[in-house]
Amino acid sequence: MDFQKDLIAEYDCETAKTRKMLDAIPADVDFNYKPHEKSMSLGRLAGHLTDMSGEFALAILTQDKLEFAAGYKHVPYIPASKAELLEKFDRGLPAIRAALTAAAPARWDEHWKFIHAGKTFIDAPRHQAFRETVLGHMIHHRAQLGVYLRLLDAKIPGMYGPSADEK
């Protein structure tokens, strides 16, 4: 079994599904919409999906660790429009796919770390870090976005077959 080939296929499959969900966002949506006061805004959630499947994925594939100092303040990407969001999402995919393809087999078992303010949050083999924090995380937040869209009465595309809106 060639798990690198499987990871590439899984990345392609899940990013295609994520692209469908992002494309389902109405063009005139209010990116400040929140279904609950503790929820991320729709814009922040959609931007997070874009960063995770792009820049964060690239860090896992090309760096040994991602480390932020104690004073680091993350500024989340919040798109100004659906068009901007889709353009950024699409622009990031080729670099990730190229890095997935170029990864030497021995690199997959090397540990990758995510450290913030001196505290290690992730210390796992690269293949596990990629599957959990890119693919699994993408699937989780894509489903979350689907709930937001349903609450806004938008049509939801099917992910693993037709959705209720496609029947």
Image: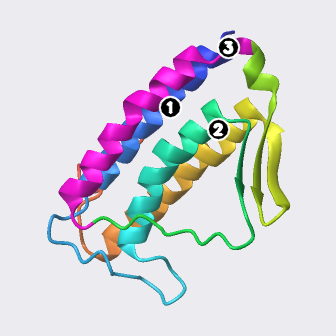
The crowding category of the residue bearing disc 3, from other C-alpha atoms within 10 Å (few below 14, some 14 to 19, many at least 20), is few
In this rendering, would 10 be left or right of 165?
A: right
The answer to whether one can see residue 73 in this image is yes
Q: Mark 1 points at which residue?
A: 11
Question: Which is closer to the viewer, label 3 or label 1?
Answer: 3
- The correct choice, above or below, for 14 with respect to 84 in the image is above
The crowding category of the residue bearing disc 2, from other C-alpha atoms within 10 Å (few below 14, some 14 to 19, many at least 20), is many
- Residue 123 locus on image (x, y percent): 83, 45
Q: Name the residue under label 3.
A: 104
Residue furthest top as drawn: 1
The crowding category of the residue bearing disc 1, from other C-alpha atoms within 10 Å (few below 14, some 14 to 19, many at least 20), is many
Q: Do the residues labelled 3 and 1 touch (CB within 8 Å)?
A: no
Which mark is drawn over residue 60? 2
112 and 139: which is toward the camera: 112
Q: Residue at the spot x=47%, y=21% of the render? A: 98
Q: Residue at the spot x=22%, y=60% of the render? A: 82
Q: How many marks?
A: 3
Q: Give the range drawn in magenta.
A: 80-105
Q: How far apart are marks 1 and 2 (CA)?
A: 14 Å
